Amino acid sequence: MKNYNVSIIIRTKNEERWISQCLNAVLSQTYRDFEIIIVDNESQDKTIEKAKQFKERLSDKNRLKVIECSDYLPGKALNMGIEKATGTFIACLSGHCIPANDKWLESLLEPFGTDQRGVIAGVYGRQQPMSFTSDSDKRDLTLVFGMDKRVQKKDSFFHNANSMIRRDVWKDVRFDDKVTNIEDRVWAKEVLDRKKEIVYTPDASVYHYHGIHQNGNSERCANVVRIMEGMHSDYSKKYIEIEKLNIVALIPIKDEIKYLNKKPLIEYTVKRALDSKYVKKVVVSTDNEKMASLAKKLGAEAPFIRDPYLSKEDVSISNVLEFSLKKMEEEKIFPDLIVSLEATFPFRPSGLIDGMIIELAKRGLDSIRAVKTENKAIWKEERDRNIKQLDEGVTPRKLKDPTFIELRGVGTVTHPEFLRNGSLFGQKNGIYEVNNPYSHIEVRDEEDFEMASVLMKEWFK
């Protein structure tokens, strides 16, 4: 078995949203003499399954190892990983940190290479916020991780979200495996007491979506962040690299094949999904073999036939999508994002799917749904047959705050963790306005098909 110069220890717990981006960045490094050891804290999502798929990209499958750590403590996890490592140098990286460039590993190593006296025990790098990081965390990351390299002889600040240590120093000073946090600073204090040094290098930078302190006064924090954004040209410009994500379009459909203007109704939805720049795979979730066969001819996949009970009228779309995700994962399909599309909406504008994906990534949303704007009065009939107005009443349309009507079937983009729990949405949700009047039209009954057949000729002019 090959020994590597650097062992990268990545600690994870439910990092399925981040692990692909993290590992993609690690495997893009110009410095190649490294192995990866993932120490996982009993993840309940698909972190490990996604990580193991990266083994297929490696000629040496032992170059990526996975260790399970029960009764997790941060120092204990690092010690477990290092015990399995072969490297002279140990890089520590959080599973939700993304190296900012392909020189990240070289930059962590560089101070050790110029250490003629052999006094450097550890090196840690810069942490930059994401575009959607909270204001307080943006402020803290920028204030703590500056642009000047420094050597610390007394200051024991050290951060294992992005660091490297010498293995021979670790043999003398292991991480405290009993403390619940700041194991990095406890370790740094002890090595400094032994006349070693700590180096901070801003060149070894990672993107880290959360900060190192709790939120403070929100108004004051927002003002500080605005000033910092003006001072730093590269400040918080990092978005999720959606080109590298495994994005799956999922189309649930039931019953027999229906036709609109001599084409299968589902073809319009499959085509829009296949036209997406970012969708890697289109999966049709159907309850019959004929539809599955058609889906494959159209360029989609149909890796399973849905249970008949999921086609009953009282079964929600969330239940259908939850079941479909489970079946996909059984087929080793592990999406980073899922685009839910219903085949009864054939009038999606070109670019809608990619626009929604970009908006979700840019804002760091849990989910985003298509909506149409409604400025007219909105009323709801209550159980006593009385009606109640839901909008702002008699306010002139131009002055009213808009109301939005959900077009979930036109498009919803979400993370699989929510579907797995029977929901389409998380806590941080967004909307994507679709105000083309055709796009709102759903085609289900005979009258819908007659109207849509006329409109479709106009749609493709």
Image: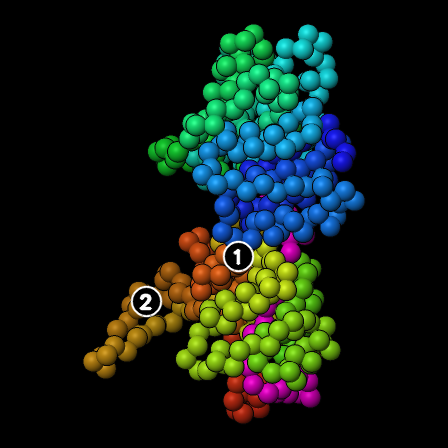
Q: Secondary structure at mark 2?
A: loop
Picture quadrant where residue 32 is located: top right
Is residue 349 shown left or right of residue 30?
left
Residue 346 image point, x, y percent: 60, 77
Residue under label 1, please give it: 415
Q: How many marks?
A: 2
Most extreme residue toward the left is 384
The quarter in which the C terminus is drawn is bottom right
Sequence-first disc among 1 and 2: 2
Decide whether residue 261 is among the magenta residues.
yes
Q: Is residue 17 above or below residue 173?
A: below
Residue under label 2, please give it: 391
Question: Mark 2 is on which residue type?
Answer: Asp
The quarter in which the N terminus is drawn is top right
Decide whether residue 190 is among the magenta residues.
no
Q: Is residue 142 above or below residue 308?
A: above
Picture quadrant where residue 280 is located: bottom right
For this rendering, which residue is in front, 291 or 100? Answer: 291
Residue range of the region highlighted in magenta in the rendering? 238-264
Residue 318 image point, x, y percent: 46, 69
Residue 41 image point, x, y percent: 50, 42
Question: Mark 1 is on which residue type?
Answer: His
Q: Which residue is located at x 44 percent, y 64 percent?
A: 422
Q: Is residue 120 above or below residue 93?
A: above
